[in-house]
Image (cartoon, rainbow, N blue to C red):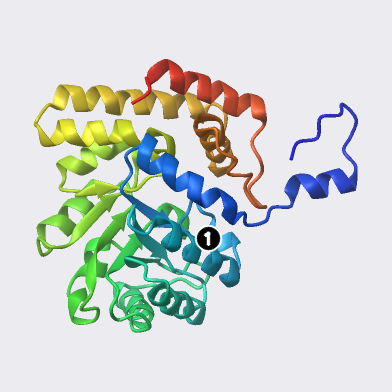
Amino acid sequence: KQVVTGRKPTSAQLHLMFTTEVNLSQIGPYIDYLTKKQGVKSVFVNGTTGESLSLSVAERKMLAKEWCEKANGKMEVIVHVGCMSLKDSQELAKHAVEIKADAIAVMAPFFLKPKTAEALKLYLQEVSSAAPVLPFYYYHIPAITGVHVPARDVIAGIQELIPVFRGVKFSGTDLMDLGQCVSSSPPQWSFLYGVDEQLLAGLAMGADGAVGSTYNYLGCHVNKLIAAFEKHDLDQARKIQFKLQELLGFATNFGFDLGVNKQVMNDVSGLLLGPPRLPVMPCPPTHAQAIAKKYFELFTEC
């Protein structure tokens, strides 16, 4: 909620601005928007954009359950269950089985960090053991976790520890690491690239798909980029990638963070997806409006 008075906000007004609660009622319309307007076929729930580490375990369960129920028959649902506590991660993994999620993913814990690939593998194995029937993805996002163990070292021999291992959500910029992951992995594994501004480079290195925050409102255009790449039409793929980079470059001038991106999602989609939870600050409306205006200048409706 925004304070519209020109006076200094009261403590009660500040409390309203920064109090955020889970709102399950928007998930159904959100799924319809993603599938019908954006052509998105899979969703990564309780990840970074979903502010999972700012939510309680109970809140994450509520969200995951609602997504799985509402998306049934419409979208594949991968639930991120990574936490700072191994026990919490295992609890969420068990819950993912109960709600019939399609797969789970886990990022490295980043308060007390694993120092080696072996330590991280053992952690991932323990989480997977709580949901041994579900396909398992490692969520590699070193810029957030500060865990800079190469993904290629994490996945080397991991199928012996996690038989249901199916791939990596690779949200790192080290394309050499990505390439070595792809070149040394079984063909049935998937590598989902998570750096929106350089997706085309990720595809060239062998990524099978993409998971990104901007795909909430750019999904249909990214589908066109992937289709052009698969048809070997690099000129068209580059045109779309360059437009996305121009948009993100423009947005960076406004401090393009999670709070800004969420408000842009609201403005472009027309949905009421809410503000972020502290410590992420809400976006000034004028910033999001300027970015949304740039979006509509660059991209026509699919």
Could you say which quadrant of the image residue 222 lies in? Answer: top left
Q: Residue at x 49, y 82 (%)?
A: 87
Q: Residue at x 40, y 64 (%)?
A: 79
Q: Is residue 76 visible?
A: yes
Location of the N terminus (image quadrant):
top right
Residue at the spot of label 1: 52
User: In this figure, what is the number of numbered marks?
Assistant: 1
Looking at the picture, tell me which residue is in the foreground, 182 or 104. Answer: 104
Q: Residue at x 48, y 64 (%)?
A: 64
Q: Is residue 230 left or right of residue 293?
A: left
Q: Is residue 147 visible?
A: no
Q: Residue at x 32, y 33 (%)?
A: 220
> x, y (%) of residue 89?
46, 75
> x, y (%) of residue 247?
42, 25
Q: Is residue 165 left or right of residue 40?
A: left
State whether residue 241 is above or below residue 150: above
Looking at the picture, tell me which residue is in the foreground, 266 or 185. Answer: 266
State whether residue 268 is above or below residue 78: above
> x, y (%) of residue 47?
45, 57
Q: Is residue 31 left or right of residue 174?
A: right
Amino acid, disc 1: Ser
Could you say which quadrant of the image residue 231 lies in? Answer: top left
Q: Residues within 10 Å of mark 1 (few under 14, many from 20)?
A: some
> x, y (%) of residue 207?
20, 48
Q: Is residue 118 left or right of residue 248?
A: left
* Residue at the farthest top position: 297
Location of the C terminus (image quadrant):
top left
Secondary structure category for the residue under label 1: helix
